[in-house]
Image (cartoon, rainbow, N blue to C red):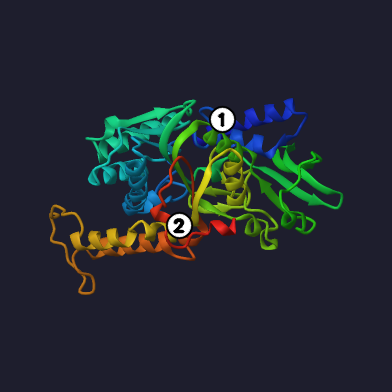
Amino acid sequence: MALERSAQLLAQIRAALHAGGGWLPFDAYMQQALYAPGLGYYTGQAGQFGDFGSDSDFVTAPELSPLFGRTLAAQVAQVLQHAGLDTVVEFGAGSGKLAAQVLGELDRLGCAPRQYAIVEVSGALKHRQMDTLRSAVPHLAERAHWWRALPDRFEAVVIGNEVLDAMPVKLLARHETGWMERGVAQEGDDLVFADHPSGLQPPTPEAHALPLGSVTEIHPQALGFVRTLADRLTRGVALFIDYGFPQHEYYHPQRHMGTLRAHYRHRALDEVLLWPGLADITAHVDFTAVALAAQDAGLDVLGYTSQANFLMNCGLLDLVAAAFAEGPAPRAPSSSAAVCSPLTPPGGSHYLRQTAAVNKLLGESEMGELFKVIALGRGVSVPLRGFTRGDRTHTL
């Protein structure tokens, strides 16, 4: 079934190649591979998200631990209460676990929003999100609404966890004659990369200094999305959490082959043209470009820091301590008596899983440093809790 869907998508891509004279810009290919109706990676299936060992392709923070969403909710609650807002908007809600975690914690804090809106392009994922919310927070599920697009004007706290990295990018390759745009062509039965002159240039002197043979990305769709958000968000804060760098790191010589990767069954692949529609395709975020686009469109940059700093500022360690004090949820005894290892007390596996997840969320060699959080806003003056220590806005 999956290979059949990929074959159908490949036929569409070949038709687009024919219509384009045998060449497609890479962002057009990536758009098809991820978002072609009913066939793309995010529009044709609903099983991408999950823990290691599951039938999934990658793990996101809400899948690792419910403490991620609960901690993020502390920042959301601060803005909702300070600004008197009653709407939260989440882009690309995945399995729905983050929505359930945030809604549940906001309810516990006494500030559950009137509306939790999810902007989702995938019908399959929408149904999975509905099921997750009905199971995890049934008393709040009716507050969830699904938007196909943003309204012309709205006030809200906006959340985007691993959204910007999935927006199609353009590729540039440096030749002796200058920079050329990298796209996709067909060679026999195979899709291959091919470079064409286009006039596009990388955005910084550091990028221009990359050696011959270098390949890098630029992000017109992500920046266009930020501008659209700025045009329509009349009051509120947008929090984007993703892996990426400021420009002086993004275009560092050590990344002279760019950051583009495919993800399939928890493996990162360099062969991004493999199995269109079945493998995720991502590129790291250029946070400097995001901040500049936001400022040019009238939004304020309210903070920028590592995921580890943000989560600790928002009280993750307090939630960990409380979770450990409560212990694991009680479970019915099995028909055969369980035998505990003398080295592992009852519930010990629960604590080990919690600790491993938190270490991954905070670890410098894991998600804690690679992932960053940027806050953009309009009409909100309160210093945001998540950036009280370790704010790196000056590095953008």
Within the image, what quadrant is residue 129 found in?
top left
In the structure shown, which secondary structural element does the residue marked by tag 2 occupy? Answer: helix
20 shown above or below 221: above
Can the viewer see residue 280?
Answer: no
Q: Is residue 206 visible?
A: yes
Counting from the top left corner in percent of width and height, residue 289 is at 62, 47
Picture disc at residue 36: 1
Q: Secondary structure at mark 1?
A: loop
What residue sits 28% from the left and 39% below the top? 112
Seen at 34% across and 41% down, the residue is: 80
Q: Amino acid at mark 1?
A: Ala
Question: Which residue has dot 2 on it?
Answer: 307
Q: Foreground residue, 170 or 112?
A: 112
Could you say where residue 24 lies in the image, as x and y percent from the top left?
A: 71, 34
Q: Is residue 190 above or below residue 335?
A: above
Note whether 339 is above or below 10 in the view shown: below
Between circles 1 and 2, the one closer to the viewer is 2
In this view, 220 is above or below 212 = above
Question: Where is residue 222, by image quadrant?
Answer: top right
